[in-house]
Amino acid sequence: MKRKTTALFIIVTLFIGISSCEELTEPQPAPKNCEVEVFTVNTSSSKTVNYEVIKTGDVTVEYVKYYSDNGFVTINNPTNFPMTLNFTLSYELDSIGVFAKAEVHNGKIEVKMKVTSNNNTISQEDACSQIIN
């Protein structure tokens, strides 16, 4: 009788031990390295420019770079999003664009540009995302 009780105790203990094990989690994918950009050349005498940089989810932005009325600007490790930039560029500044580099864990980085000159508007956008379920 003592052997049956001991065997039953061992079986119950093993069952409880096995059933209480933590569920194994699958490894998470590595962050996705993204470089997004929109760029154009516009030789009109004057143009209104609107840039947007939008980050959603778990994204680390290394830099945002853009052409402005003060030349080419770089912002390292920006934290204020969404970022909206508006200005007027003169004829001498014909390169127009916004660029971003980011590490996307579970989210999205986007850049958008709208250029208006001589009553014509050009819009461009680029995005990079990684969604983890």
Image (cartoon, rainbow, N blue to C red):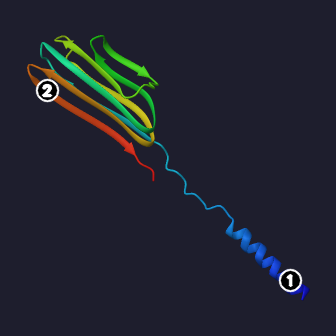
Find residue 5 and name its label.
Answer: 1
Tag 1: residue type?
Thr
Image quarter of residue 55 = top left
Residue found at x 25% / y 34%: 125
Q: Is residue 70 above or below residue 114?
A: above
Mark linked to residue 121: 2
Q: Position of residue 95 (x, y in %)?
A: 22, 20
Residue farthest along the bottom direction in this orientation = 1
Question: Could you give the CA–CA distance between mark 1 and mark 2, rounded to whole angstroms?
Answer: 85 Å
Q: Residues within 10 Å of mark 2 (few under 14, many from 20)?
A: few
* Drawn side of residue 122 relative to residue 27, left or right: left
- Front one among 116 and 20: 20
| Label 1: which secondary element | helix
Residue located at (8% from left, 19% from top): 118
Image disc number at residue 36: none
Asked if residue 77 lies left or right of residue 45, the reply is right
Question: For mark 1, does the 10 Å Cα neighbourhood hold few (<14), some (14 to 19), or many (20 or more) residues?
Answer: few
Question: Residue 16 placed where, x, y %?
Answer: 73, 71
* Residue 93 figure quarter: top left
Q: Position of residue 117 (x, y in %)?
A: 12, 19
Element at label 2 = strand
At label 2, which amino acid type do we have? Thr
Q: In the image, what residue occupies the spot 52% across and 51% down? A: 28
| Of the two numbered discs 1 and 2 in the rendering, the one whose residue sits closer to the viewer | 1
